[in-house]
Image (tube, helix red, strand yellow):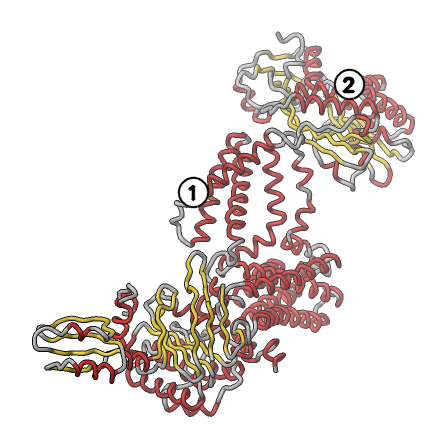
């Protein structure tokens, strides 16, 4: 008798089913349309069917499947526990001779049945209809995986929504909190990272924005099931979380006061947590938004003040359920004072983050690049961006030291620099800076000129055996030469390797290239190297063999070169042949020797002069001269 | 037997019930009076085990009521605003009650159809407020509770129905020793029902009395003398209130009826009348000394 009333009561059970049974029906109809009907529709068209022959059932009717999966469990939790959020029914249900554990268990058991039954029926349908499909679209194992994944995710979302329902007395907030619950862990982390970058000079925020953050959001994980199978660990984590949410829910439910129905936050001690937590989150969103849009500190500060105020007011409006909350400004002043102190801690770098540098002899290897990618990626050959040689580590270290000592925030002509260290004790340190071009070049040059840099940068310098080389193509789309003779290939490769090792940094001249050098190896491997105009050894080699005319454009291909002084500083990519026609030329060059000089120096970079090259075949090329590299005949 | 011992309840800043103590003996009807917001409903919800008190104890037959299934099976709380599951018929609700309350009496449920002339397959939500209240009583009486807690129960019932309900109530109290707590803001409504009455004001129980006791101990006296009333007349008599209407003296006197009559006869009045007081008058005079204006407490 006591067990009967404690665990199961037919009256309550029937009542709950009557109340939420429709969710089951909707889920079944939705899935029935998304899967069995959809598959038969597809079976009319073989191509359509073949396209989905991956065995992944999530791939079929996925928009319907996922939208049901992401909404129904949460809706169900709201409807099931609606009785707690309405005063009349809350009083009524708790006047009945049923313990809260009993009420709770019966509600979640019915909830789980309501979710699992339609999924089971659809899995059954899939198994039954399999022989009737014209091709084998899935196996029984696929159905089992689909079933387990769908059930696990449904129960996780359901239990989470039940849990937040215990914290609030309003159904609409229960729904909102349910989504917040699952986005929050990743979301707050991303927000913090996006905001820290405005306060911590050198903060390598991209390093922390790794894809593993996505794994913390179950919705994104579920969407991956279209292409990847659910992992056993995933099932385990979700199941543990589900039970944890149930456990917490029942614990909270027993502490909950019935009269708190319709209150935004049911437990009083949680109200300040909600108010300031909400204010803080909205503040971070505002800071990140204005920072990202305007890239200026004063806009970040404006974003903080503006959005924290908005957040604070909204939080109070939700709690008090009225918009007349403007008398509660005192606590906000307290919040501002507190946040200002926290802000100052970062601004004055009391944690020593901005100035921290390990001592030079602790460093095992150093990373230097314009992006974080190779620092964290295990897939790519790591040697590409790490430096082991003492001299290079020291140069990188000195660059870092300079950046720490001269904090700058350049606006134009800047480069991204990522400096990282792997220490001998296993620690990793990484910083990211934006550096003005001239400082960058100054520190980049010694690193660039080192042999280790070249080896890191050019795979061809790391390769030792070239017997598998099939051919080498030198040139551009219009003009190129092909080397297929073994002796030619070997001779060229020797020169090329020498050329690359000899290459020195000329950062300010911009980017001038004749085309690419493409080396094809066996097994479809290949290697592409920019054929820079400064590669004199290559030029010489081609010249000696009379191949230069074939490999690149020369003065013989050119009718004339029109040089325009770019007084309006119009960016190169905006120039069109029509604009060239209309613009007054500073000079038109037809002399072969001067044309050749123009070809040698034209490139893509600073736009002091715009250079229109008119070819004999009618093609028009628009390039530029930078102020550092201008033919001598232009004064 | 309901025992309420130093019970307090707060809603945030608001102290809704302040240190209330009283008891309701088995088989009696207790009237809880007070204006809107006095705390009647809160107190009753605590007795019904819905709200949990912050301080004090509430026991029914010696057991705390909160989350006590054994006791809650014997209690029914009928709130002033009724709740029924959405879209249910009387029959469906009856089935629900049958599964919930072990003493449910199906025979009685059918029998009572004569008293409540409503089709039991009708949806409750479509009914008028008065009919819904009849349904509530119908279901409640069929569940045969030992303790019945009624919050403003007679609102919305017509005079005939009120009498029917009162009759069943009396019958159950007399036959089954059902214990009843009934709240009202209207003294007349419960005057003929209750054995005992408590008045709640701003969360405190300011007065608690047996009705019979009240009525036998307080009297309205009209007397007239030749000339002024002798000064010894007021001595030895507990006069709560006096006023002259012409030569007739009207006073409210506390004490035993025979003693008062004997005392007055001694002074040889030319006119003497001993009149009964209404409950309302009793409270007005009882509480006059406590500094409450009765119209603030009872409407």
**Disc 1 sits on a residue from what chain?**
A
Q: Which of the two residues, A550 or B59, is positioned nearer the viewer here?
A: B59
Q: Earlier in the sequence, mark 1 or mark 2?
A: 1
* Residue at the image point whose x is 70% and y is 30% from the top: A418
Residue at 45% x, 91% y is B108
**Secondary structure at numbered mark 2:** loop
On screen, residue A449 above or below A7: above
Residue A220 appears in the picture as rendered: yes
Q: Count up the numbered dots.
A: 2
Please check whether the numbered discs 1 and 2 fall on a single chain: yes
Task: Please tell me whether residue A162 is drawn above or below residue A396 in the rendered image.
Answer: below
- Say what secondary structure mark 1 lies in: loop
Image depth: mark 1 or mark 2 in front? 1
Q: Which residue is mark 1?
A: A329
Q: Position of residue A304 (x, y in %)?
A: 51, 37
Towards the viewer: A46 or A55:
A55
Q: x, y percentage for residue A73?
A: 58, 63
Residue B228, by quadrant, is: bottom left
Question: What label sits on residue A504 in the rendered view?
Answer: 2
Q: Quadrant of residue B189?
A: bottom left
In the picture, measured across the screen, residue B159 lies left or right of residue A448, that is left
Q: Are marks 1 and 2 in contact (CB under 8 Å)?
A: no
Q: Is residue A114 visible?
A: no
Disc 2 packing (10 Å; few <14; some 14–19; many ≥20): some
């Amino acid at each position: 008798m006591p067990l009967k009333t404690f665990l199961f009561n037919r009256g309550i059970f029937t009542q709950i089913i009557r109340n939420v049974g429709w969710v089951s029906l909707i889920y079944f109809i939705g899935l029935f349309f998304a899967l069995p009907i959809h598959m038969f529709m597809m079976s009319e068209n073989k191509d359509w069917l073949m396209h989905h022959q991956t065995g992944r059932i999530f791939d079929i009717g996925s928009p319907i499947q996922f939208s049901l999966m992401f909404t129904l469990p949460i809706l169900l939790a709201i409807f099931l526990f609606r009785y707690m959020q309405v005063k009349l029914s809350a009083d009524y249900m708790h006047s009945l001779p049923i313990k809260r554990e009993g009420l709770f268990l019966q509600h979640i058991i019915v909830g789980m049945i309501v979710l699992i039954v339609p999924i089971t029926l659809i899995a059954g349908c899939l198994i039954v209809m399999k022989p009737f499909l014209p091709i084998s679209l899935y196996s029984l194992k696929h159905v089992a995986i689909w079933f387990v994944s769908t059930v696990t995710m449904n129960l996780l979302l359901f239990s989470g929504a039940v849990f937040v329902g215990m914290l609030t007395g309003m159904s609409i907030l229960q729904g909102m909190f349910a989504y917040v619950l699952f986005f929050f862990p990743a979301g707050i982390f991303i927000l913090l990272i996006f905001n820290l970058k405005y306060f911590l000079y050198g903060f390598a925020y991209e390093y922390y924005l790794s894809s593993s953050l996505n794994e913390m959001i179950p919705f994104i994980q579920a969407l991956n099931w279209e292409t990847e199978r659910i992992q056993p660990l995933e099932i385990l984590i979700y199941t543990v979380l589900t039970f944890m949410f149930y456990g917490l829910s029942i614990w909270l439910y027993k502490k909950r006061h019935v009269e708190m129905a319709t209150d935004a936050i049911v437990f009083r001690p949680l109200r300040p947590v909600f108010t300031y937590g909400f204010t803080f989150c909205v503040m971070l969103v505002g800071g990140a938004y204005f920072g990202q849009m305007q890239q200026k500190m004063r806009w970040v500060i404006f974003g903080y003040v503006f959005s924290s105020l908005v957040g604070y007011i909204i939080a109070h409006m939700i709690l008090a359920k009225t918009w007349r909350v403007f008398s509660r400004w005192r606590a906000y002043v307290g919040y501002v004072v507190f946040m200002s102190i926290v802000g100052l801690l970062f601004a004055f770098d009391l944690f020593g983050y901005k100035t921290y540098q390990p001592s030079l002899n602790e460093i095992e290897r150093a990373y230097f690049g314009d992006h974080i990618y190779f620092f964290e990626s295990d897939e790519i050959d790591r040697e590409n961006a790490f430096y082991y040689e003492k001299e290079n580590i020291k140069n990188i270290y000195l660059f870092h030291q300079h950046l720490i000592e001269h904090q700058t925030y350049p606006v134009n002509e800047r480069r991204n620099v990522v400096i990282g260290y792997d220490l001998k004790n296993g620690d990793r340190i990484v910083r990211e800076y934006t550096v003005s071009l001239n400082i960058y070049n100054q520190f980049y040059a010694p690193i660039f000129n080192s042999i280790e840099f070249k080896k890191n940068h050019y795979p061809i310098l790391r390769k030792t055996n070239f017997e598998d080389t099939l051919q080498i193509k030198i040139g551009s789309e219009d003009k190129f030469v092909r080397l297929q003779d073994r002796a030619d290939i070997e001779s060229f490769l020797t020169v090329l390797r020498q050329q690359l090792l000899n290459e020195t940094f000329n950062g300010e001249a911009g980017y001038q290239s004749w085309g690419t050098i493409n080396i094809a190896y066996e097994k479809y491997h290949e290697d592409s190297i920019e054929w820079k105009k400064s590669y004199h050894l290559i030029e010489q080699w081609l010249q000696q063999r009379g191949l230069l005319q074939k490999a690149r454009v020369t003065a013989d291909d050119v009718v004339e070169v029109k040089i325009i002084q770019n007084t309006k500083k119009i960016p190169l990519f905006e120039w069109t042949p029509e604009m060239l026609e209309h613009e007054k030329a500073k000079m038109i060059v037809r002399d072969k020797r001067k044309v050749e000089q123009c070809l040698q120096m034209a490139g893509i970079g600073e736009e002091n002069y715009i250079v229109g090259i008119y070819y004999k075949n009618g093609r028009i090329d628009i390039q530029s001269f930078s102020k550092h590299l201008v033919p001598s005949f232009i004064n | 037997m309901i025992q309420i011992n130093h019970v307090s309840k707060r809603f945030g800043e608001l102290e809704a019930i302040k240190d209330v103590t009283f008891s309701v003996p088995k088989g009696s009807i207790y009237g809880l009076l007070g204006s809107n917001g006095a705390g009647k409903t809160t107190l009753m919800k605590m007795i019904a085990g819905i709200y949990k008190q912050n301080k004090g104890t509430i026991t029914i037959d010696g057991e705390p009521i909160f989350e006590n299934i054994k006791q809650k099976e014997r209690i029914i709380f009928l709130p002033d605003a009724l709740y029924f599951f959405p879209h249910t018929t009387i029959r469906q609700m009856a089935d629900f009650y049958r599964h919930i309350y072990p003493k449910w009496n199906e025979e009685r449920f059918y029998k009572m159809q004569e008293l409540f002339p409503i089709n039991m397959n009708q949806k409750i939500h479509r009914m008028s407020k008065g009919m819904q209240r009849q349904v509530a009583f119908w279901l409640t009486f069929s569940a045969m509770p030992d303790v019945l807690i009624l919050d403003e129960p007679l609102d919305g019932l017509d005079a005939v129905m009120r009498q029917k309900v009162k009759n069943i109530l009396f019958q159950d109290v007399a036959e089954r020793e059902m214990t009843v707590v009934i709240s009202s803001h209207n003294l007349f409504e419960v005057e003929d029902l209750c054995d005992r009455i408590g008045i709640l004001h701003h969360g405190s129980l300011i007065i608690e009395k047996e009705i019979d006791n009240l009525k036998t101990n307080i009297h309205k006296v009209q007397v007239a003398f030749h000339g002024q009333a002798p000064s010894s007349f007021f001595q030895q008599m507990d006069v709560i209130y006096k006023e002259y209407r012409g030569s007739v003296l009207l006073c409210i006197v506390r004490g035993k009826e025979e003693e008062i009559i004997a005392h007055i006869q001694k002074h040889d009045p030319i006119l003497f009348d001993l009149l009964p007081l209404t409950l309302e008058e009793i409270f007005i005079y009882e509480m006059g000394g406590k500094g409450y204006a009765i119209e603030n407490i009872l409407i």
